[in-house]
Image (spheres, rainbow, N blue to C red):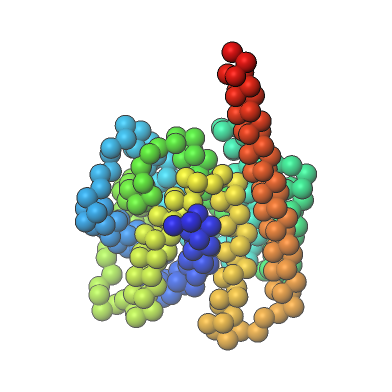
Amino acid sequence: MPVYVAYALVVIIWSTTPLAIQWSNDSVSFVTAVVMRMTLAAALALVAVLLLRRRLFTDANAWKAYLAASFGIFPNMLVVYWSAQFIPSGLIAVIFALSPFVTGGLSWLILKENPFSRRRILALVVALAGLCVIFWDQIQIDERSVFGIGGILLSCGLFSLSSVSLKRLQCSTGPLEQTAGALLFALPGLLLCWWLVEGTLPLPQTLSPKSLTGLLYLAVLGSLAGFTLFYFVLQRMTPSAVSLITLMTPVLALMIGSLVADEHLSPSLLIGAGMVLLALLAYLDLGVEAALRQRLVKRKKATQTEVEVNGA
């Protein structure tokens, strides 16, 4: 599968998860919803690994990769769900838009790579401003908001640290094995939190059709397919480029919500979406330029090596 097709699929899948999360919480608590989602996704991932005759620990460093990836699930998912109790989804989207900055900083510290230039920073600032235009009515801060803002900032750090750490490890495990391993390593912490907070499973008859639909969608597409495609993309692109997903998903999620719920597309949504789109085009253009420069450098080195060999 081409990496850009996988990238687009991740954006589409993760753009639909906010609506699915709302449905999954219809008749159960957010802790139970997260645990049921990840447990079912882990079971499906293990079945897929067995059917395809794959092995999880063929690489000596596989467990390190699974542990690093698990940070994006636990405690990250619980932190996001908990923070959503204190701030609206629009403010969450705006704060998550800081992920490319956090990822870039961690890439500089851990990978010794500087993904930023003046043009890229300007593009990210414009994209952040576009999200602020879209969610301006929801950017309200009070005493309770401090908890939510702190939680989402922590989530940005966990998401970025997980992505950059995986890139640094350079593990040879496949995306499906990476998904299964990450879910397995995240489950003990999720189950412990569920046992401390809830401790009882909901009866089948208490699950509403909306909750059941949301949980199945999140387990199969949001987690199993979404994580597998995400790790596939992360192995082939830089963490900074992958972190741009956090800029695209809230805009697309609003548009999908408008289509599904027959909501009116406001002028602020259209203006903000245009700003985000222009910013992403500027960022991606720079990425193409960087790739071309890197290709020219490699070609120059190859030419120099050939000249040295012929001279010898």
Q: Is residue 180 left or right of residue 236?
A: left
> From what the image shows, is residue 227 above or below residue 215?
above
Residue 11 x %, y % = 53, 63
Q: Is residue 198 visible?
A: no
Q: Position of residue 299 (x, y in %)?
A: 63, 34
| Quarter placement of the C terminus | top right
In the image, residue 238 lies at what x, y percent? 56, 44
Which quarter of the picture shows residue 115?
top right
Q: Do we see residue 26 in this rendering? A: yes
Q: Nearer the viewer, residue 212 or 117?
A: 117
For this rendering, which residue is in front, 202 or 260?
A: 260
The residue most toward the bottom is: 262
Counting the numbered discs, the total is 0
Q: Residue furthest front?
A: 310
Is residue 165 found left or right of 283 in the rendered image? left
Above or below, 63 against 229 in this view is above
Q: Residue at coordinates 67% horizontally, 81% vertically from top-left?
A: 265
Q: From the image, which quarter does the N terminus lie in?
A: bottom left
**Residue visible at 66% across and 30% down?**
300
Residue drawn at (59%, 80%) of the image: 258
- Residues 66 and 59: in front is 59
Residue found 65% across the figure and 51% down from its top: 98
User: Horizontal placement of 200 versus 141: left or right?
Assistant: left
